[in-house]
Amino acid sequence: MSPAADSVILLHGLARSERSMQKLAEALQKRGYQVQNVSYQSTRNNVAKLAEQAIAPALAACAGSAKVNFVTHSLGGILVRQYLKKHRIENLGRVVMLGPPNKGSEVIDRLRDFPGFYFLHGDAGLELGTGATSVPNKLGGVDFDLGIIAGTRSINLFLSSIIPGVDDGKVSVERTKLEGMRDHLEMEVTHPFMMRNDRVIGQVIHYLESGKFKRE
């Protein structure tokens, strides 16, 4: 792939902003990519509406690119899956997801009825559980070039106590996986900060340019 002719759309996670992806954006720009670091109001709508609101304008801004790639954190990955279920991107390149709740998260199941949860996380937050209303579980597998990085370190012992198996404090490693993915990598990073980790950023770039993660 030729970075000089390619774009990367960045999509942040739930209740975050484009600032959380800024370090990654700068690293990709230095590599030669045209970067769209998208800001969207993640707590103001459901997954389906957010996908349209966030992705369609970003794609328009990438007009003329040879390839359009995506790098996402958490909810951002679900937005890409939702969008690509409804739309075809002819020049779609590769997608890298960081800590995606691809099969939902038990944290949502446990906390969704707590006072204030909906106010802080909105409709999209309620849709990220593992039960009958789980949007990620309704979307199925993928048919695009996808690499996933899962964190294995937590700084929230309470939330980790809710999650079976190894987790990043919000999502278990197992629930990041998805049928059709090309590669999956576990790294000792936490959910809130993985997108700012230098090693993670290096792996993102490696996947975008080679279609696989780098292993020692």
Image (tube, rainbow, N blue to C red):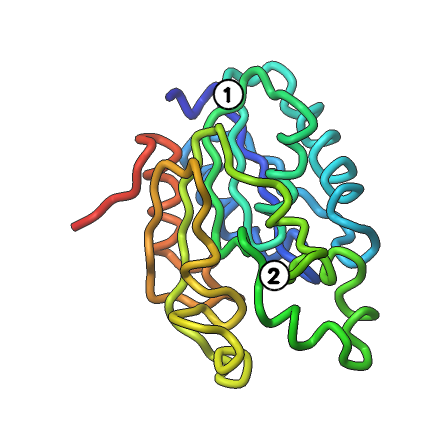
Report the number of numbered marks.
2
Where is residue 159, by image quadrant?
A: bottom right
Extreme residue toward the left, this view: 216
Q: Residues within 10 Å of mark 2 (few under 14, many from 20)?
A: many
Task: Report the disc number at residue 130.
Answer: 2
Q: Position of residue 148 (x, y in %)?
A: 42, 47
Q: Position of residue 215 (x, y in %)?
A: 21, 48
Three-letter amino acid code at disc 2? Thr
Q: Residues within 10 Å of mark 1 (few under 14, many from 20)?
A: many
Q: Position of residue 164 (x, y in %)?
A: 45, 73
Q: Is residue 34 above or below residue 90?
A: below
Front position in the image: 164 or 79: 164
Q: Is residue 88 above or below residue 69?
A: above
In the image, which is nearer the foreground, mark 2 or mark 1?
2
Q: Position of residue 145 (x, y in %)?
A: 43, 30
Q: Secondary structure at mark 1?
A: strand
Report whether 64 appears left or right of 193. Answer: right
Where is residue 50, by image quadrant?
A: top right
Q: Is residue 107 above or below residue 122?
A: below
What distance separates the C-alpha of mark 2 from that of mark 1?
Answer: 33 Å
Task: Report the disc number at residue 67.
Answer: 1
Report whether 110 appears left or right of 186. Answer: right
Residue at horizontal 41 percent and vertical 61 percent from the top = 173
Three-letter amino acid code at disc 1? Lys
Where is residue 63, by image quadrant?
A: top right
Front position in the image: 134 or 23: 134
Report whether 46 appears left or right of 182. Answer: right
Extreme residue toward the bottom, this view: 158
Front position in the image: 174 or 22: 174
Residue at horizontal 64 percent and vertical 31 percent from the top = 85
